[in-house]
Image: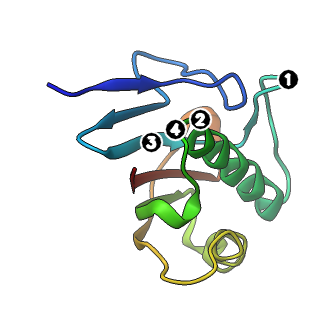
Amino acid sequence: MDKRVIQTSKAPAPIGPYSQAIVSNNMLFISGQIPVNPATNELVSGDVAVETHQVMRNLHEILEEAGINFNHVLKSTIFLSDMSLFAAVNEVYGSYFAADYPARETVAVKGLPKSVNVEISMIATM
């Protein structure tokens, strides 16, 4: 099987038995990212727009470590602590894409790791 781990110190280290991302058959599968600043290992909290920017920066760093960028993203999944946050998260998320947006679903869940408000995972092509 063609499987390679992607790991960068520019994104938060996994807090469990998983990888930041896996490449297999020219596809990149990025684990859900939360608003953790990798330099301090501290949560970025308060305003959900600030939190979402941190999540997107973390995703950017993983994409970059794999040698690609947001233009290669095929699908995203956004998890929210409350659907009332949708508009603010959507505005920030959309600012990272120029056109040909990826497929996506957004769901509100009962809880997220470390009680954050937003988590995003992605699938990209290499």
How packed mark 2 is, by other alpha carbons closer than 10 Å (few <14, some 14-19, many 20 or more), is: some
Q: List the residue tagged with mark 1.
A: 40
Q: Nearer the viewer, residue 65 or 91?
A: 65
Residue for point 83% across, 57% down: 50
**Marked residue nearer the N-terminal end (4 or 3):** 3
Q: CA distance from mark 1 to mark 4?
A: 23 Å
Q: Are marks 4 and 2 in contact (CB under 8 Å)?
A: yes
Residue for point 67% across, 49% down: 55
Task: State left or right for residue 98 relative to residue 3.
Answer: right
Residue 117 x/y as whole percent: 65, 53
Helix, strand or loop under label 1: loop
Q: List the residue tagged with mark 2.
A: 65
Q: List the residue tagged with mark 3.
A: 30
Total tally of numbered discs in the picture? 4
Q: CA distance from mark 3 to mark 2?
A: 11 Å
Helix, strand or loop under label 2: helix
Q: CA distance from mark 1 to mark 2?
A: 20 Å
Q: Identify which amino acid the numbered label 3 is placed on.
A: Ile
Q: List the residue tagged with mark 4.
A: 66
Q: CA distance from mark 3 to mark 1?
A: 21 Å
**Marked residue nearer the N-terminal end (3 or 1):** 3
Q: Are marks 3 and 1 in contact (CB under 8 Å)?
A: no
Q: Identify which amino acid the numbered label 4 is placed on.
A: Ala
Residue for point 49% across, 78% down: 101
Task: State left or right for residue 60 relative to residue 112.
Answer: right
Q: Are marks 4 and 3 in contact (CB under 8 Å)?
A: no
**Marked residue nearer the N-terminal end (3 or 2):** 3
